Amino acid sequence: MAEQHRPPYRSPYRPHRRPTAEAPDGFAAALRSAVRGEADFGPTARALTTMDASNYRRVPLGVLAPRDADDIAAALTVCQEYGVPVLPRGGGTSIAGQATGTGLVLDLTRHLRSILALDPVARTATVQPGVILDDLRAAAAPHGLTFGPDPSTHSRCTLGGMIGNNSCGAHSVAWGTTADNVRALEVVRYGGEALRLEQGRALGPHGVRELIDAHLALLRTGYPDLPRRISGYALDALLPEHPGGPDPVRAFCGSEGTLAVVTEATVRLVEAPRARALAVLGYADESAAAEAAPGLLPYRPLTVEGMAADLVREPAGLLPRGAAWLFVETGGATPAEARAHAERILRAADAVDAAVVTDPAGQRALWRIREDAAGTSTRMPDGTEAWPGWEDCAVPPARLGPYLRDFRALLAQHGLRGTPYGHFGDGCIHVRIDFDLLTPAGVSRFRRFSEELADLVVAHGGSLSGEHGDGQARAELLPRMYGTELVGLFGRFKDLWDPDGGLNPGMLARPAPLDTNLRFEVLPKRPVDVAFGYPQDGGDFAGAVRRCVGVAKCRTETAPGAGVMCPSYRATGEEAHSTRGRARLLHEMLAGEVITDGWRSTEVRDALDLCLSCKGCRSDCPVGVDMATYKAEFLHHHYQGRLRPAAHYALGRLPRWLRLARPFAGLLNALARVRPLAGLAKRLAGITPERAIPELATETYSRWLRGRQGKGTHIVSSSRVVQVWADTFTEHLSPQVGRAAVRVLEEATGRTVLPPPSGVCCGLTYVSTGQLDAARAVMRRTLDRIGLLPGHPLVVLEPSCAATLRTDLPELLPDDPRAHELASSVRTLAQYLEEYAPDWTPPRLDRPAVGQTHCHQHAVLGDAAERRLRERMGLTGELSGGCCGLAGNFGFEKGHWEVSVACAEEQLLPAVRGAEPGAEVLADGFSCRTQLDQLAGRRARHLAEVIAEGLEDGRP
């Protein structure tokens, strides 16, 4: 119905609005005329950069993606002229707030990401600041080299950001911090002056040497001696007695963008061990593990990482007994040498239990627990939110055990909970704490705790920051660590570099208070009226959006075998098309400050348009952001009372049209082969012209099954039946899959497959297009008709429909117990066979297999049963991860063709093209099979079809 026939739409919440600063008159025009890079002052660009991975939020004026060092110098000149602050930004994964700013954000990741030189003899590399750490490591790997520091965000953090924060990572016990591995820097000051920093050369701007010479005694006595001292400016690196002479590069590292902008860096590379082993040591508790860690350092391990049981939500199966563990990695020229090194550590360690893991897959599984901790620790086991803020304090390693006991006691004193983990070998602890940052009382407690913890860290001889920098979270408390005189010297050092105060103001020198600019204060105070139940977030949509803490695992651009999330970002490279970017836009939509039109926002709509609803983030995001659900929710409200895109009517209501078309399938297939008619139909339906219209089945699956049972097959007992869901795709577009499944189920179980009830539908296409009122009506009708037999699972052949029944159904009908009963009954074919025919022997095929694991299956159902079944059948090889790119209606919609193809080209199409002759091409999803047919000209089959063929051939 057209919008004018309905009353005006009213947003179900009132966004919190406050005026945002605007760029000075003439600034945008002057900037654009001075640079070649892209300058964007629109709401989308600003909303995407209001936050990093911290608790803080500041709204910038705009974003510039400079193309080269000249662009940076020109931008800094214009910004000085207009008095606009500047924030250099890399991957935006900073945890203390230093990657948020109120002026112009320099996005250094878009263009400045070249490795300019790599010298394997000198073991150095020269890089631009936007180079991703993993890209540098990949370039160095053929020479047997690597860059030593490796934070857990190595797949998306940039070298510029690592220099700004003096990042460390798990291997710092062997290779040190970023400051230990930078040889020279090219930087540009506010105002455009370029400088080169190198040990043995000038210490920086005029006046720095005089400042150091005037305060030698203070600088010699004011810094604690520990391996992870990251807090403040490292002015002691400029002392004349510093090894090798005063080092302005080391003093610059960790300056958090407050002194100058890096345009080029020459870094040291180290020899990478050819083989690695992992000694996993179990201890009674985390204090015991912490006290054991220093004793392992003389054995020169590569890492000594620690974590307690409360971080391990799903044990990897490789962990030895214990309530806390040390991961001690060793290296060697051969696997045997690495293993022998690890076994020596096992013998030296006084552990409750221990194991050595040499299998690379097993090591990756264990390291993933540790690397995902920055996300998984944001939720307590009971689902309570936990936040950074005291993420990475460091104490001398010998003091770590007593410090952890005192830290736990302080948490209990304030009624707080946290899950410590981190770099035990360096005395550095990460933790997320369940602060209440939504209420004034909670924020007040956050401040009191922060002050007392700062005192505790200092009492143990530690540093407020041991890895991630001070930012806004800790810089206010630096006088407790260094004293007011040394902190005053920090301010004078900053002023020599940046007398106008234009570079990242509010950080390090003269910092903003730690309890201001919190990102939660702008969100609605009461829950927003929504359609989904959000059971993991207390029914609160704002709580669901808050899940995204910004660790940006979704920004990984090349991740073969690493999961599904986020295919549209990997196709476009645009932050707006990452899971984090979309979550940021939804956050700003709820805030109403930058994005002011609520659910009607075109900025949010455009960002979500390229979301494939693959659900990959539901499983791959460390904090379980579910952007497919958020997209459906947004579309539901965005189009309420308005005309929708044509594809929503044509594809979103596909089950209805297919039921109506069933009697005319042959005629419609013939008409679809007439190119002008097909073109007209696609244009009217909002379908991209590059797509072919799938052929309709002339005999549906359910009609075939009823006809077959009418010819002699009958039910003997209600206990000897199988219920198979007749999804829309199997019913009308690929009934051969249903026929094959019936053959397999009857052979394997001796049971009879029941004819499906008519008119049932999971509601998938309605959900994916945000037609949630219609989806709920369809789901209720299904629950009325399905007639589940108690104790009988429901076999669902189409993974996307199985995922909808498992998740969307109970979340859209949370008060209907039938929805939860149906959701819990869902099984894939392989799951059912494993559960109800465990002794059945499938046909042995013994050939390689390629293809696609459906993204919804990966995210919601898992594919362990399918993997085991393929192994029993002799189908060897791994199926592709990622997403096929068709993703239901997505790949058919106009405007999505290029992204759809790019997603398929990432993993699926290259794997199929490179497959051995005779390889089986598997794809349980109709979308995956269609994509392979239309883009590769290859017919893929459902696993049921392959098994059925083997049975027909009489394979043993």
Image: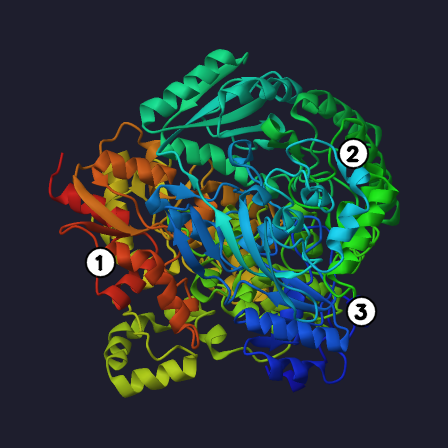
Secondary structure beneath dot 3 equals loop
Q: Is residue 563 visible?
A: no
Q: Which mark is residue 451?
A: none
Secondary structure beneath dot 1 equals helix
Q: Position of residue 211 (x, y in %)?
A: 79, 51
Q: Earlier in the sequence, mark 1 or mark 3?
A: 3
Q: Amino acid at mark 1?
A: Arg
Q: Amino acid at mark 2?
A: Thr
Q: Quadrant of the C terminus?
A: top left
Label 2 crowding class (10 Å Cα cut-off): few <14, some 14-19, many 20+?
few
Q: Which residue, given by chain and number where applicable, does mark 3 sit on? A: 17
Q: Earlier in the sequence, mark 1 or mark 2?
A: 2
Q: Earlier in the sequence, mark 3 or mark 2?
A: 3
Q: Position of residue 926 (x, y in %)?
A: 33, 59
Quadrant in the picture for residue 603 = bottom right
Q: Position of residue 391 (x, y in %)?
A: 69, 40
Q: Which residue, given by chain and number where applicable, does mark 1 sit on? A: 913
Q: Which residue, given by chain and number where applicable, does mark 2 sit on? A: 221
Front in this rendered view, residue 904 or 410? 410
3D distance between C-alphas at marks 1 and 2 = 65 Å
Q: Is residue 619 visible?
A: yes
In the depicted structure, whether residue 74 falls above or below residue 931:
below
